[in-house]
Amino acid sequence: MSSSTAGKRLLKEYKALSSDPPEGILAGPCDEDNLFVWEALIEGPKGTPFENGVFPAELRFPKDYPLAPPKMKFTVDMWHPNVYSDGTVCISILHAPGDDPMQYEKASERWSPIQSVEKILISVMSMLAEPNDESPANVDAARQWREDRKGYEKRVRDMVRKSLGL
Amino acid sequence: MAEQTLNIPQILAFLLIAYLTIRWLRKPSSSTPASAPQYRQTPDLMARVDDLSAMFPQHDRRTLAWAIQQNRGGPAAIAERILAGHTLERPPPTFLPNLTERAPTTTQPAAQKSAKPDLITRYNLKAKVDAAGEVPSEEGTKKWSQDKEERKKSLAKRREEMILAARRRLVQQDQGSPSA
């Protein structure tokens, strides 16, 4: 019952994202037979070292979506303070209001059923442009971002080129 | 008279109780070091653990450190024991040597090396990269189709388009500024 609610909601979001996609964002189920696993592509924001990059990620939705948020994991190499080395994205919108591992997030920033896949992806896009230094998921990337910004930007640009086979 | 004979056992009892009380009171302070011994950390412990860990990465560094502490025979004897198929003794929970320095630096490069394949390879776009050149292929439709298969195709098409467009922009940027 709840899983069919989730399915309906996901299909609705898929439809909205396909008919009117936000700039630089693409998302949909990998296979419509299973609406709970999506692939999303995010373009690197302009004016950042991620510019010109395309970053695919996998979204895994829980059966009680939209009560609980999905999990998001980049499936390309990523070098960012808020992305774990295995690609898992760590931002407040992906955290349920109940669990706040870092004890700093405002309730309004966290997941709630009025959020959506589109809002997640837009948040992640702006996260690429502006890392949140308060909760580093990748400590090494966070340190480089803080202490050696040039080195960080170069590393990201090299990563973008490599990901596009250049 | 009767009072005197009663007094001696009373005094003895008092002395015994006093002795036991004092012993009991002093016990916690004197026995703490015995139950949680201060593990002295020799300066070369790290180096020895590193050597053993390089030979036997399947063993936990803490276990190896404990084995070195316990076994005075040195790393060679421990290596022999591992090779002979003996299991190493599990270190007690109180044994917390400072072994954090080398471990992350040795795993970091390995993690970086396991790079994921680039998007062109992953989505099989090699032919399109070579063929398309500057000609942008037709737009993937943004319309919502009633057909599941068509929707799937459209999504795949738009995905290809996005990746190829990004690559074209990067190539153009390179040609525009050769300094890059």
Image (tube, coloured by chain):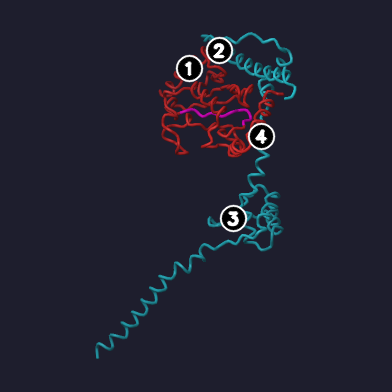
Chain colours: A red, B cyan
State the separation of the CA atoms marked 2 and 1: 12 Å
Chain bearing mark 3: B
- What residue lies at 62% left-to-right and 37% top-to-bottom? A144
Give the alpha-carbon distance from disc 1 to disc 3, as whole Å: 53 Å
Q: Position of residue A11 (x, y in %)?
A: 48, 17
Q: Chain of mark 1?
A: A
In the rendered view, does B82 fall on the left or right side of A72?
right
Residue B33 position in % (x across, y down):
51, 65
List the residue tagged with mark 2: B151
The three-letter code of the residue at mark 3 reads Pro
Quadrant where the image shows the N terminus of chain A: top left
Q: Main secondary structure of the magenta part?
A: loop
Question: Which element type, helix, strand or loop, lies under badge 2?
Answer: helix
Q: Which mark is drawn over residue A11?
A: 1
Foreground tag (1 vs 3):
3
Which residue position is annotated with label 3? B97
Q: Nearer the viewer, mark 4 or mark 1?
A: 4
For mark 1, does the 10 Å Cα neighbourhood hold few (<14), some (14 to 19), or many (20 or more) residues?
some
Residue A12 location, x and y as percent? 46, 16
The residue at the point 42 percent across, 73 percent down is B23
Lower sequence index among marks 2 and 3 = 3
Q: Secondary structure at mark 3?
A: loop
The circle drawn on residue A151 is 4
Q: Quadrant of residue A148?
A: top right
Amino acid carrying label 4: it is: Gly
Q: Is residue B142 magenta?
A: no
Hey, what amino acid is under mark 1?
Answer: Leu
Task: Look at the numbered disc 4 and give the secondary structure of its residue.
Answer: helix
Amino acid type, mark 2 = Arg
